[in-house]
Image (tube, rainbow, N blue to C red):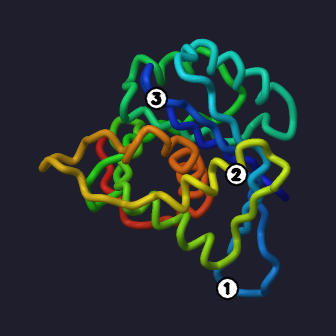
Amino acid sequence: MAEFILGVSLGQASEFSAICVLEQSAIESGEERPRNRYGCRFLKRWPLGTTYPTIVSEISKWVGNPPLRDGRLILDGTVVGRPVVDLFRKGNLPVKLEPVTITGGQVEALIHGWYQLPKHILISGVQVLLQERRLQFARSLPETHTLVKELHNYRLDPPKVATDFYDPRQRQNDDLVLALALACWWGERRKREMTWWV
């Protein structure tokens, strides 16, 4: 049975915000460890200056009905912080909200209900799926060309300061890549050793 994962990358006023919707389905292979394939079903980049309440309202309309209802919404709160993530919570969306902070560290963790996710893990997940041909995009989606261009131009550079928290964007137009990477990460999550704090 297919499941839907929504990756949302939120930018500040001078940056784009974007969403990527992936349909996840199992590959029938008879292998011990099941693998999934992903179809990119929807991409959107909001115009610069789009308010966060407007984004919440639009997403609320999309997830109000099947097949997106009861999906997972993986939300990057790195740049915008807890108040904007709380806007999504107050919207009572019929999806499971999973907030993420993208870090420059090495270890994945879950801290106070937020995933702390090293950027290299996030981006390498997309690379693996593309290399294994388990990630497909519909050419008919208006933003597919933009996403492919972003993927070709993307470079994973280390943070310029010695801190675990930083702006995950390499440049202004990485929004679709980050939205895609968030959805891919959730879909490929395995039970791995994580650090847990209450």
Residue 152 vs residue 33, the one in the foreground: 152
Q: Earlier in the sequence, mark 1 or mark 3?
A: 3
Quadrant placement of the N terminus:
bottom right
Distance from Cα at disc 1 to Cα at disc 2: 36 Å
Decide: is 141 above or below 56: below
The quarter of the picture where residue 46 lies is top right
Q: Residue at x 43, y 23 (%)?
A: 14
Amino acid found under the numbered disc labelled 2: His
Decide: is 21 above or below 26: above
- Mark in the foreground, 1 or 3: 3
- Mark in the foreground, 1 or 2: 2
The quarter of the picture where residue 189 lies is bottom right
SS for callout 1: loop
SS for callout 3: loop
Q: Position of residue 50 (x, y in %)?
A: 57, 17
Amino acid found under the numbered disc labelled 3: Glu
Quadrant placement of the C terminus:
top left
Q: Earlier in the sequence, mark 2 or mark 3?
A: 3
Instruction: Give the residue number, with chain letter if any, for mark 1.
Output: 32
Residue 95 vs residue 163, the one in the foreground: 163
- Mark in the foreground, 2 or 3: 2
Assess disc 2: are there few (<14), some (14-19) or many (≥20) residues with their C-alpha within 10 Å of its C-alpha: some
Q: Position of residue 15 (x, y in %)?
A: 46, 29
Instruction: Give the residue number, with chain letter if any, for mark 3.
Output: 15
Amino acid found under the numbered disc labelled 1: Glu
Q: Residue at x 70, y 66 (%)?
A: 135
Q: Residue at x 32, y 39 (%)?
A: 167
Decide: is 83 above or below 112: above
Instruction: Give the residue number, with chain letter if any, for mark 2.
Output: 145
Distance from Cα at disc 1 to Cα at disc 3: 43 Å
SS for callout 2: helix
